[in-house]
Image (cartoon, rainbow, N blue to C red):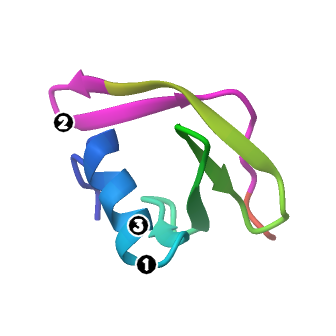
Amino acid sequence: MSAAALSTAIGKMIKDDNGAHAVKTVGGCMLTAKMTGDKITLTDEKGSVATVTIADVKQSNGVIHVIDTVMLPKA
């Protein structure tokens, strides 16, 4: 299920989960969101880390966050 999670909400989720928040993608993959300084980073199931470079791009069906790395599924 998709959600319109703004970066402030994601930051709170990370803080509330003691520094790492599990995120299930619409495609069924699991990412781990963390804070690195004031930036949100995402780690995929293969261990690749992406940094959110542009946050909170509102669209008609939700919100997107631009990242600097391609994220891939485990299998």
Residue for point 54% across, 69% down: 19
- Residue type beneath disc 1: Asp
Contact, CB < 8 Å: mark 2 with mark 3? no
> Left of 43 or right of it: where is 56?
left
Mark 3 and mark 1 in contact? Answer it, CB < 8 Å: yes
Spot occupied by residue 17 in the image (x, y as percentages of width and height): 43, 78
Instruction: Kindly identify which residue carries mark 2.
Output: 61
Task: Determine whether the residue tagged by mark 1 lies in a helix, strand or loop.
Answer: loop
Verify CB contact (< 8 Å) between mark 2 and mark 1: no
Q: Looking at the figure, which quarter contains the N terminus?
A: bottom left
Which residue is found at the position 84% from the left and 62% from the top? 47
Quadrant of residue 20 within the rendered picture: bottom right
Q: Percent position (x, y) of residue 61?
A: 18, 36
Which callout, 2 or 1, points to the residue nearer the camera? 1
Element type at marker 3?
A: helix
In the rendered structure, which amino acid carries the disc numbered 2? Asn
Q: Name the residue tied to disc 1.
A: 17
In the image, the segment drawn in magenta is 57-72
Q: Is residue 65 above or below residue 49?
A: above
Q: Is residue 43 magenta?
A: no
